[in-house]
Image (cartoon, rainbow, N blue to C red):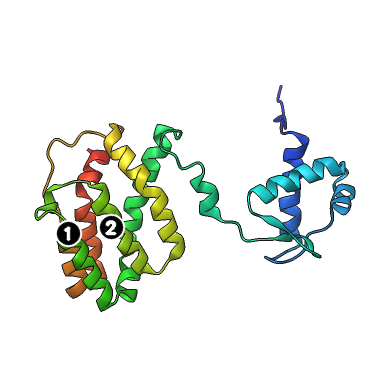
Amino acid sequence: MSFSNIDNRSLVDKVEASLVQLLSDQKLKVGDTIPKEITLAESLGVSRTVVREALLRLRMMGLIDSKKKKGSVITSPDLFGIMNKSMNPHILDQETLKDIFEIRMVLEIGMADFIFHRITKADIEQLKEIVNNEPPVTDHFIFNTDHEIAFHGKLYEITGNKTMKKFQKMLLPVFEYVHLSGLLKKNGNVKKFVSHKGLVEILENGSPELFRNAMRNHLENHFARIFE
C-alpha cells in the first residue's frame, strides 16, 4: 500500500503560499498594486477574513505595504532586518551555529577582489590606525571582539556591498559565541598566523590572490578547530 503525503497546513498557510505564487505569476514589481481583498478572496475561493490574515503575514515579512490612495503595494523586504530578529545564538541549534561560523570565514576569504577594486588610500590609513590601537603581538591572539569588529568591519565597508556589511554585523556575535561556547574542537596547538597588520601590508602592496591566501592563514586556527 502507498499513501500520499497529507497536507497539514492551515488554510491561512495555503492562502499565504497561493498569494506569493500569484504575485510571482503576475510578475508584479516593487511599487505595483496588488488586487483588493475581495478580488483575492473570490479568486482563491476563501473568505476575506482568511485573505486578510494571509496579507497581514506578508506585511509582517515586508513583502507588501499599505499606501494611501493605492491600497496594498509590493515592497522590497528588509531581509536582514527579518533575519536579525531570529539571529540570536542562544536560540539557534548547534548545527546552525556551526554553519553560520563557517559562512563568515568563507565570506572574508572570498571578498578579496572587491576590496582591492574599491580600496582607497584613505581606507589604508584608517586600517593602519585601527591596527595601531591593537596589542603589538596580535598574530598570537585567536579572537578579540573589539579588534574583530573594528578591523573586519572596515573590510566589509570597503567592499562597498551594503548587504554584506549588514550580514557581517549579524554574523559576528554568532561567530564569537561559537568560538567561546565549546561547540568546536579545542585547538591545543595554536599556530602563529597573519595578523591584521600583515593583512594591511598586503592590501597596500600585494594582490587579491596574496590577500586571499593571507586571510586563509589569518583564519587558520579556526579552520583547524573545524577539520582536525
Residue 123 is labelled as: none
Tag 2: amino acid: Ala
Q: Quadrant of the C terminus?
A: top left
Residue 200 drawn at (x, y percent): 19, 66
**Quarter occupied by residue 164:** bottom left
Mark number, residue 150: 2
Residue 168 image offset from top left, x and y in percent: 39, 54
Query: Along the polypeptide, which appears first: circle 1 or circle 2?
Result: 1
Q: Secondary structure at mark 2?
A: helix
Along the viewing direction, whichever of 117 and 84 lies nearer the viewer = 84
Q: Are marks 1 and 2 in contact (CB under 8 Å)?
A: yes
Q: Left or right of 105: which side holds 15?
A: right
Rendering quarter of residue 35:
bottom right
Residue depicted at 74% across the width and 33% down the height? 10
Q: Which mark is residue 133?
A: 1
Please indicate whether residue 220 sits to the left or right of residue 101 in the image.
left
Q: Nearer the viewer, residue 146 or 109?
A: 146
* Residue 17 seen in render: no
Residue 19 vs 165, above or below: the answer is above
Q: Is residue 172 above or below residue 66?
A: above
Residue type highlighted by circle 1: Asn
Residue neighbourhood size for the residue with mark 1, other residues' Cα within 10 Å, grouped as few (<14), some (14–19), many (≥20): few
- The reply to whether residue 64 is in sight is yes
Residue 46 % position (x, y) = 86, 42
